[in-house]
Image (spheres, rainbow, N blue to C red):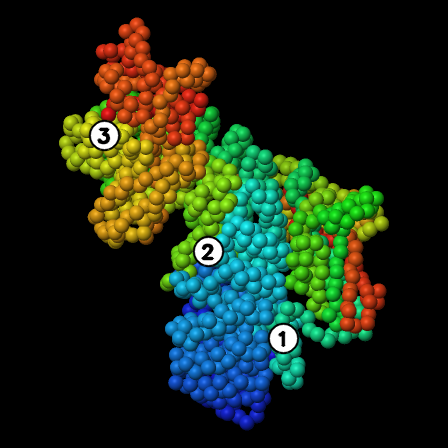
């Protein structure tokens, strides 16, 4: 294992050693992402087998440190792909250079990859004219640090992806213990100039506000609107405007970025329902029957369906019968994994398994982990709909109609569990 | 091209080879060589020998090479200060380079070279860069001032950089503003006294404007800085809050948390009646919940902070219980924190769900988590009475699993449930006893022993059970030994005939064979009690126990308020003030929440907290005197009773101290006869805690002065052991219409004490200090000072239990200490408490009969006149006197400071020392205390 490079350069080496001995090589599982060793605090995050650590002796803003470490990972990934030992060794000079730019005396500076890429490249600094240099500095420090001037595209195009992950915890009796959707709106923009964008969705608050003007519309649109519990935005969005008018307006960074994140808990469409039945037959046998029901329009197709049924540690053999897809007992994962490629809405499918157990004298009962499920559906389980995305660029001569826009909805399973 | 090859050169003549390459003419080769040097440096090899050669490469117009050389310089300049001077020239030159990137790079690197000689040369270029035309250079220079200050603070001040930095707060570029704020905040932290960040409404306005425009990191700096500002009134606080709330929708969690910090702090100044206050509360919940969908490390930071917020303002998240449900694959640190918050949010409305969850968790794998879940079930039972039954049955189910640590944890919590609901769930004792043998943890053993002792009369074989523990008495932990001693004494008192031998055995084990002073002392006390006065022993040992509080592990209110000021930072993660983990003088300035301003005070409802005092939303965490006493006699088991962990751990010590001084003389007499003074001991236990035996006898001589009401002798309120050497004793007096608290402060520590201050928690009659506590000179060791603190009754009101309980916080330069005391009600009897006769009659009839309370005052040798005179001097006025069938009937009235009238009928039969007292009052809860006041006045 390689302790991250930059810790060694911001603090003395013995701090790195202390961290290695006490955290990385500690026998126990990590009990906290913040460790205090001899009045020195260590923050760490782990990416595959790389530990990124930040060190301080002061009462620093802990949330900022973690946000920074994640950002650091994003920036590194944007420059050289996966964060692995190999890649870090291959790019250590670049990492030094990046750190030098995004962190000064412990203060995070600009960490937007788009802006960084204008003057830090793997090949070092390109020779620049004087205008270019001052343009870079004004951009890095300016109000719109995420976008440079003078971008041109022959075809103005934008892609909106509404990506949702639906989370569920259900009791064996089918009672919803908790359910929420955490969604992201990811935008890929290929737009010329400094376009001013306005994004609209079927947010209940907005629609009700508008509905007051035209009374007849409320009946229609009221049903389709959704209640958003909370949302957060990319730094390009004018938050004060959102706070006062609830309108989402911004000048987007070039290329791909996450416009917003949101969370809903009301009126969620649960794409699948899992009905488990576990019966203990004597001390050495378990009978499991699981039914899954799809609950969406029959014309839509769910994909990549996977049901994971946990089995006890002392399982000796499993016989499975399923009507659809393939199921296999994976001893190393202590689970029966049932995969179905595609499934239309309003269908149901069933699997039954007989699990043979080895007799044990372990007093402790099997903890019965929940049955979990993975899937992908072509709609947004929260019910979110994009109503419009308007683009204005006053200086260049293209209008909103000239922009080609694509919208796609993908609903995925987050932690989708049913207790059994 | 990959860089990894640089790590692989490990040949012997490496340094020599590198030297040659560094001096090569070819640029590419030079660059390669420097990269190799840096690689060696990174893995910890010493390449300082190459210093001159590397520095030679500095003069280049290739930026990449320059950056590499700078990197090397930063690492080795400190070890080669003389050589580092060689680099100065290039730095100075680079600071004037036409390329702003190079100017910034030079000034940034120079700041990182921590060599005194270099810093001198740095000043001029830095001054220029601070006023550079390019914002990128300015923002880098701003940070450089902080770096320089870290190396040589004096130099920065002498050169006037601080003023330049202050000017940058008004810079047109948002990032420059943000960095200047960050630098100034850091410098200000090491100079707590200086007025560096002199924030005023104008500068705040500038910061709020910059907040909308700068990067996410800059927003964090600005918000953290704003949190240190103290708005002048509630309106300013509100307008800042309004401009900060949009930040709650930022994608960066740190921005959100810092905004929460500002809001939580300034909210303190807003009146609760304000519509905006409610709106703000509603706005805070969703972003806090959203933080829980962040990466696990951030979730952890967020949860630690939510834990604080929930304690400070439970109303924010009370409907959000479900989001804290534990997910199967949450990391363990997230699970444990969620569980903690779940218990805090548990209420009658959601208890069913919570219990179902907790039961689920108790079957998980991680031992710590399971233990905490089991404990949580017990805490739910204590917190929500309606759920107690279900909790107990859940715990019994868990005990049936026979998983060792689950059983032990369950027994520990069941003990607490027994204390909260006595005589309700004894049916489960049998099940508990079955598991006696599997208990191997001291806490569980002690809990089990307590249960056996407490319910000895219902357990047939209690003596056998306890005897079985006695065999290994010396191998047990102190906790178990103490508990065993008490349990056996209880058993003896309940079943004296069968257990005499057992009690003898345990007493001799405790007193003769043990070298633990706590155990020995307690053994002696019991022995003495039992041998002198078994009835008193019974009253003491089997006394009714005070109820335990619902909340546990609460953070003590002043610390909580301080931590709220540190939301988002490490202090809020550790739940410790920065002074606990930061070295040196930095960051030890105590922060506190802003007090409510005058304009909002008037609109405040009685429930809101008075300025600066522990917030009234908190359940009181100050252990009442009664608790201390109860603990001595019955319970050593950790902190379920109350409050701050610190106090809890000292309870046992403090309790022994209660009896301290005076008993030395008893125990000094080792032949165990009945020394004359011993008889007084049980009586003393009931009396207010006094410092020594002499005080006890003083009681009789303490006669009230004629001009004022009766004054009790001073009693020790805060023993020195609990307050780091400060001993406080005191009493309450009322003289010509004014109440005062006469205090005696004794310094029993070795250091001088200064900076005394005092504060009361809200109390039933609104008692509050009328003037600050004035100790004119520092209190040197062993010195005692007497102070009379005038009191008024215009403070905030909150009903206390008991009614006359007063919780006091005293601060000095060492720490803040808490204690509580009971004030005699007669200090509240006002001078104009004489009611008109007609009025009296009408009122007496008017008050319903169920409000009448009757008491008997025994052993009072006074005659009618003397009694009436004595009462009169304490402002209990006799309105009429009648003689009915040989009895003197005195009709009396008195008025409390809050305007409550109490009417009394005192019946005195000449020759009979027992008086009958009937009290009528519209607020019947005061009757008991008025009776006590009568008794105190009449008997002294």
Q: Is residue B684 above or below residue B558?
A: above
Element type where label 2 sits in the image: helix
Mark 1, other Cα within 10 Å: few <14 / some 14–19 / many ≥20:
some
- Check residue B571 in the rendering and tell me which mark sits there, or answer none: 2
Q: CA distance from mark 1 to mark 2?
A: 36 Å
**x 53%, y 62%: residue:** B202
Q: Badge 2: how crowded within 10 Å, few (<14), some, or many (20+)?
A: many
Which residue sits at x=79%, y=67%?
A157
Question: Residues at badges 2 and 3 in contact (C-beta under 8 Å)?
Answer: no
- Residue placed under numbered mark 3 in the picture: B705
Residue B465: x and y in percent read: 36, 30
User: What residue lies at 64% left-to-right and 77% top-to-bottom?
Assistant: A136
Residue A138 image label: 1
Do the residues indicated by labels 2 and 3 lie within the same chain of the protein?
yes
Residue B454 appears in the picture as rendered: no
Q: Which dot marks residue B490?
A: none
Q: Would you place residue B145 above or below residue B825 in this image? A: below
In-front residue for pair B327/B608:
B608
- In this picture, residue A147 sits left or right of residue B626: right
C-alpha distance separating marks 2 and 3: 53 Å
In the picture, which quadrant includes the C terminus of chain B?
A: top left
Q: Position of residue B45 (x, y in %)?
A: 45, 78
Side of A225 where B932 appears, left or right: left
Query: Camera-side residue: A405 or B89?
Result: B89
Tell me the subunit letter for badge 2.
B
Going by the image, does A389 lie left or right of B259?
right
Mark toward the viewer: 2 or 3: 3
Q: Chain of mark 3?
A: B
Q: Please provide percent x and percent y for residue B87.
A: 46, 86
Is any atom of residue B738 visible in this view? yes
Q: Element under label 1?
A: helix
Q: Position of residue B715 (x, y in %)?
A: 26, 36
């Amino acid at each position: 294992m390689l302790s991250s490079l930059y810790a060694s350069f911001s603090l003395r080496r013995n701090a790195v050693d202390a961290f290695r001995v006490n955290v990385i090589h500690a026998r126990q599982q990590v009990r906290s992402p913040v460790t205090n060793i001899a009045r020195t605090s260590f923050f760490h995050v782990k990416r595959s087998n790389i530990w990124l650590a930040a060190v301080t002796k002061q009462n620093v803003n802990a949330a900022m440190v973690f946000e920074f470490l994640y950002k650091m990972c994003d920036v590194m990934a944007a420059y050289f792909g996966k964060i692995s030992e190999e890649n870090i060794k291959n790019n250590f000079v670049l990492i030094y250079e990046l750190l030098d730019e995004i962190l000064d005396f412990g203060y995070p500076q600009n960490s937007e990859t788009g802006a960084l890429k204008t003057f830090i490249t793997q090949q070092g600094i390109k020779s620049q004219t004087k205008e270019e240099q001052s343009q870079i500095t004004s951009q890095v420090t300016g109000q719109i640090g995420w976008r440079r001037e003078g971008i041109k595209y022959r075809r103005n195009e934008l892609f909106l992806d509404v990506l949702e992950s639906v989370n569920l915890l259900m009791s064996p009796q089918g009672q919803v213990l908790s359910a929420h959707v955490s969604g992201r709106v990811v935008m890929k923009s290929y737009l010329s100039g400094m376009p001013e964008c306005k994004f609209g969705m079927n947010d209940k608050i907005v629609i009700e506000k508008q509905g007051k003007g035209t009374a007849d519309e409320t009946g229609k649109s009221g049903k389709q609107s959704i209640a958003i519990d909370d949302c957060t935005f990319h730094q390009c969005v004018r938050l004060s405007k959102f706070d006062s008018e609830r309108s989402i307006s911004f000048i987007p960074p070039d290329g791909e970025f996450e416009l917003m994140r949101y969370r809903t808990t009301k009126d969620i469409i649960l794409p699948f329902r899992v009905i488990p039945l576990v019966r203990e037959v004597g001390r050495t046998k378990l009978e499991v029957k699981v039914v899954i029901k799809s609950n969406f329009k029959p014309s839509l197709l769910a994909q990549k369906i996977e049901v994971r049924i946990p089995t006890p540690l002392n399982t000796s053999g499993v016989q499975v019968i399923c009507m659809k897809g393939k199921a296999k007992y994976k001893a190393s994962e202590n689970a029966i994994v049932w995969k179905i490629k595609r499934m239309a809405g309003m269908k149901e499918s069933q699997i039954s398994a007989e699990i043979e157990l080895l007799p044990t004298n372990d007093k402790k009962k099997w903890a019965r982990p929940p049955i979990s499920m993975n899937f992908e559906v072509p709609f947004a389980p929260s019910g979110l709909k994009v109503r419009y995305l308007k683009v204005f660029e006053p200086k260049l001569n293209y209008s909103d109609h000239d922009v080609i826009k694509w919208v796609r909805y993908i609903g995925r399973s987050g932690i989708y569990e049913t207790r059994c | 091209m990959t860089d990894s090859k640089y790590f692989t050169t490990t040949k012997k003549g490496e340094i020599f080879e590198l030297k040659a390459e560094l001096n090569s003419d070819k640029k590419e080769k030079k660059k390669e060589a420097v990269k190799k040097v840096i690689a060696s440096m990174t893995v910890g090899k010493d390449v300082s020998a190459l210093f001159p050669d590397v520095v030679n490469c500095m003069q280049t117009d290739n930026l990449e090479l320059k950056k590499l050389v700078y990197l090397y310089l930063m690492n080795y300049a400190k070890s080669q200060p003389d050589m580092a001077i060689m680099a100065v020239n290039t730095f100075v030159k680079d600071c004037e380079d036409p390329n702003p990137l190079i100017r910034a790079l030079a000034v940034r690197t120079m700041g990182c070279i921590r060599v005194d000689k270099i810093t001198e040369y740095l000043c001029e270029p830095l001054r220029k860069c601070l006023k550079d035309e390019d914002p990128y250079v300015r923002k880098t220079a701003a940070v450089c001032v902080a770096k320089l200050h870290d190396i040589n603070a004096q130099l920065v001040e002498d050169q006037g950089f601080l003023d330049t930095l202050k000017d940058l707060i008004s810079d047109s570029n948002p990032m420059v503003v943000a960095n200047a704020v960050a630098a100034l905040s850091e410098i200000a932290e090491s100079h707590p006294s200086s007025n560096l960040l002199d924030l005023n409404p104008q500068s705040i306005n500038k910061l709020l404007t910059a907040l909308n425009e700068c990067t996410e990191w800059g927003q964090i700096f600005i918000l953290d800085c704003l949190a240190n500002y103290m708005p002048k009134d509630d309106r300013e606080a509100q307008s800042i809050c309004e401009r900060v709330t949009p930040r709650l929708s930022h994608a960066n969690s740190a921005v959100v948390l810092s905004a929460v910090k500002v809001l939580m702090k300034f909210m303190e100044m807003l009146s609760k009646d304000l519509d905006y206050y409610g709106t703000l509360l509603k706005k805070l919940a969703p972003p806090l919940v959203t933080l829980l969908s962040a990466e696990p490390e951030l979730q952890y930071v967020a949860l630690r902070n939510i834990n604080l917020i929930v304690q400070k303002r439970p109303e924010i998240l009370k409907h959000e219980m479900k989001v804290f449900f534990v997910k199967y694959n949450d990391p363990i640190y997230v699970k444990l924190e969620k569980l903690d918050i779940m218990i805090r949010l548990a209420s009658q409305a959601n208890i069913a769900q919570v219990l179902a969850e907790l039961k689920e968790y108790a079957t998980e794998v991680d031992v710590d988590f399971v233990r905490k879940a089991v404990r949580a079930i017990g805490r739910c039972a204590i917190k929500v009475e309606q759920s107690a039954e279900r909790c107990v049955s859940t715990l019994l189910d868990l005990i049936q699993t026979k998983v060792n640590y689950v059983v032990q944890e369950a027994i520990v919590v069941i003990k607490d449930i027994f204390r909260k609901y006595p005589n309700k769930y004894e049916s489960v004792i049998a099940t508990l006893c079955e598991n006696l043998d599997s208990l191997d943890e001291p806490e569980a053993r002690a809990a089990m022993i307590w249960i056996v002792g407490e319910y000895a009369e219902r357990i047939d074989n209690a003596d056998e059970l306890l005897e079985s523990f006695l065999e290994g008495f010396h191998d047990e932990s102190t906790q178990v030994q103490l508990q065993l001693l008490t349990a056996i004494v209880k058993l003896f008192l309940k079943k004296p005939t069968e257990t005499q031998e057992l009690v003898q055995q345990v007493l001799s084990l405790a007193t003769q064979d043990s070298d633990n002073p706590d155990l020995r002392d307690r053994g002696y006390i019991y022995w003495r009690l039992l041998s002198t006065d078994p009835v008193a022993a019974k009253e003491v040992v089997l006394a009714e126990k005070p109820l335990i509080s619902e909340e546990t592990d609460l953070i003590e209110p002043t610390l909580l308020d301080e931590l709220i000021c540190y939301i988002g930072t490490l202090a809020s993660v550790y739940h410790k003030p920065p002074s606990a983990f930061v070295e040196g003088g930095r960051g030890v300035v105590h922060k506190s929440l802003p007090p409510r301003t005058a304009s909002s005070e008037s609109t405040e409802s009685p429930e809101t907290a008075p300025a600066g005092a522990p917030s009234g939303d908190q359940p009181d965490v100050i252990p009442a005197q009664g608790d201390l006493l109860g603990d001595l006699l019955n319970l050593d088991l950790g902190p379920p009773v109350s409050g701050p962990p610190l106090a809890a751990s000292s309870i046992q010590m403090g309790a022994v101290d209660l009896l301290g001084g005076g008993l030395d003389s008893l125990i000094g007499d080792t032949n165990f006869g009945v020394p004359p003074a011993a008889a007084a001991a049980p009586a003393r236990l009931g009396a207010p805690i006094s410092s020594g035996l002499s005080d006890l006898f003083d009681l009789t001589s303490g006669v009230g002065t004629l001009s004022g009401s009766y004054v009790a002798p001073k009693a020790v309120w805060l023993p020195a052991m609990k307050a780091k050497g400060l001993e406080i004793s005191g009493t309450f007096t009322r003289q010509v219409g004014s109440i005062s608290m006469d205090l005696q402060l004794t310094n029993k520590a070795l250091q001088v004490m200064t900076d005394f201050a005092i504060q009361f928690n809200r109390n039933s009659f609104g008692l509050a200090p009328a003037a600050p506590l004035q100790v004119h000179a520092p209190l040197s060791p062993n010195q005692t000072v007497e102070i009379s603190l005038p009191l008024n009754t215009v403070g905030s009101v909150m009903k206390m239990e008991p009614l006359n309980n007063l919780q006091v916080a005293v601060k000095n330069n060492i720490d803040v200490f808490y204690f509580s005391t009971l004030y005699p009600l007669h200090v509240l009897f006002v001078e104009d408490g004489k009611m008109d006769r007609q009025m009296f009659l009408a009122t007496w009839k008017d008050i319903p009969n169920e409000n009448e309370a009757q008491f008997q005052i025994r052993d009072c040798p006074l005659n009618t006149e003397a009694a009436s005179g004595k009462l009169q001097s304490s402002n209990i006025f006799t309105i009429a006197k009648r003689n009915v069938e040989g009895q003197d009937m005195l009709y009396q009235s008195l008025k409390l400071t809050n305007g409550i009238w109490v009417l009394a009928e005192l019946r005195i039969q000449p020759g009979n020392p027992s008086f009958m007292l009937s009290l009528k009052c519209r607020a019947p809860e005061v009757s008991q205390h008025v009776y006590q006041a009568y008794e105190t006045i009449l008997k002294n």
